[in-house]
Image (cartoon, helix red, strand yellow):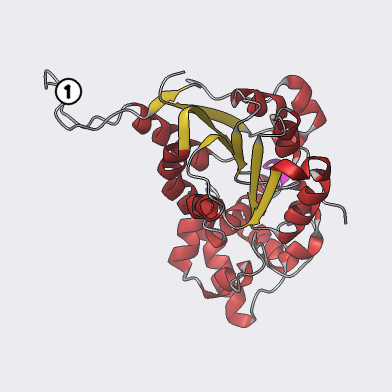
């Protein structure tokens, strides 16, 4: 299957970087290379784009897509949490812009055997990086009822989390839950019939929660934001597209903290904590997809773009 992924908020994200033709830019979630291609088109021969992705299929697709710009492109297979180390290894200390698109690609969702989708039957996998041994099946069959409840409640924001966790534990006591269909059936049985009729696909939130937990998506984001801001040159932009309220909250709070890190009590006449601002939040409110984009790409529905600029604009 061809790696297809319609880049969300493409123009808005690329223009938010204020690209310098000779600059160095990082796409930390390269995917199919949609955003990267648009960046490359605006770079001179002296400009550079470093693309990072942990998915082997994404890397193969992006390499093909960016072929005409290969003299200025470096592709690295890794998780963006290793960005600083990856850049150091190729002799780069600072960059002029970084983007992250935290969505799961259409390719990953539509490639049945990756096990990301609840719409087709497949082994419970959901690994972004297939070099990792641990899969969604391990979480579903090994986590305690309490742990399952926690991730479905927090990462899936599902009001039936307690009941879903209980049903999973009961079902796996008879035999391990091994496929997406088996898990979907268990989830359906945990949700009242009248809710199932109106509330979208009953398994959507639980699948999302398991994927986030398996790939440590929120931890990676939270632990890497400060480092990415530190990698920026003065005037460099960090632009992040989120698809989930928890991701968005992490980005929003981190950007705010980096803009105003002072921890002095408000009654102090002046700052004595010595924490200095690293820059400015460009987006007081997140940038959302246009009506046109929503019509053309239903998967852009929950996308939000937030931008931070290092130093002064």
In the rendered structure, which segment of residues is drawn in magenta?
196-200
Percent position of residue 124, x then y:
69, 68
Using the rendered image of the protein, determine whether residue 100 is visible from the camera's viewpoint: no
**Is 176 or 42 nearer to us in this picture?**
42
Give above or below for 137 relative to 312: below
Question: Extreme bottom residue here?
Answer: 174
Which corner quadrant of the image does residue 114 belong to? Answer: bottom right
Quick one: SS at disc 1?
A: loop
> What residue do we see at 49% from left, 47% from top?
221
Q: Residues within 10 Å of mark 1 (few under 14, many from 20)?
A: few
Give above or below for 166 relative to 201: below
Give above or below for 177 relative to 304: below
**Is 265 or 22 nearer to us in this picture?**
22
> What residue do we see at 24% from left, 29% from top?
262
Using the rendered image of the protein, determine whether residue 13 is visible from the camera's viewpoint: yes
Question: Extreme front residue here?
Answer: 46
Task: Look at mark 1 in the image and give the residue it sits on.
Answer: 266
182 on left or right of 155 = right
Percent position of residue 102, x then y:
61, 44
Q: Main secondary structure of the magenta part?
A: helix
**Is 155 or 234 nearer to us in this picture?**
234
Asked if residue 204 lies in the magenta stretch, the reply is no
Percent position of residue 303, x then y:
63, 33
Give above or below for 257 relative to 105: above
Q: Quadrant of the N terminus?
A: bottom right
Percent position of residue 73, x then y:
70, 44
């Amino acid at each position: 299957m061809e790696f297809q992924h319609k880049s969300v908020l493409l123009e808005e994200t690329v223009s938010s970087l204020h690209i310098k033709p000779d600059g160095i830019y990082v796409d930390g979630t390269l995917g199919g290379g949609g955003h990267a291609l648009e960046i490359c088109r605006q770079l001179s021969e002296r400009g550079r784009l470093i693309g990072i992705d942990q998915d082997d299929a994404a890397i193969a697709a992006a390499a093909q897509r960016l072929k005409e710009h290969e003299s200025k492109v470096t592709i690295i297979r890794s998780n963006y949490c290793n960005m600083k180390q990856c850049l150091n290894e190729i002799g780069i200390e600072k960059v002029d812009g970084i983007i992250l698109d935290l969505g799961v690609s259409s390719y990953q969702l539509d490639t049945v055997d990756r096990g990301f989708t609840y719409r087709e039957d497949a082994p419970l996998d959901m690994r972004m990086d297939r070099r990792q041994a641990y899969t969604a099946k391990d979480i579903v069959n090994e986590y305690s009822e309490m742990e399952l409840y926690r991730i479905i409640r927090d990462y899936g924001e599902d009001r039936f989390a307690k009941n879903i966790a209980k049903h999973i534990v009961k079902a796996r006591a008879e035999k391990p839950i091994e496929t997406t269909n088996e898990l979907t059936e268990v989830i359906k049985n945990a949700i009242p019939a009248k809710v199932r009729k109106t509330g979208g696909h009953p398994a959507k939130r639980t699948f999302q929660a398991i994927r986030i937990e398996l790939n440590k998506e929120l931890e990676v984001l939270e632990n890497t934001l400060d480092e990415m801001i530190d990698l920026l040159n003065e005037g460099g932009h960090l632009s992040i597209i989120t698809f989930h309220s928890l991701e968005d909250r992490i980005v929003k709070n981190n950007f705010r903290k980096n803009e105003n890190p002072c921890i002095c009590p408000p009654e102090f006449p002046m700052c004595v904590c010595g924490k200095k601002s690293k820059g400015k939040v460009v987006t007081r409110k997140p940038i959302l997809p246009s009506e046109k984009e929503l019509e053309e790409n239903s998967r852009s529905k929950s996308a939000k773009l937030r931008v931070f600029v290092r130093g002064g604009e």
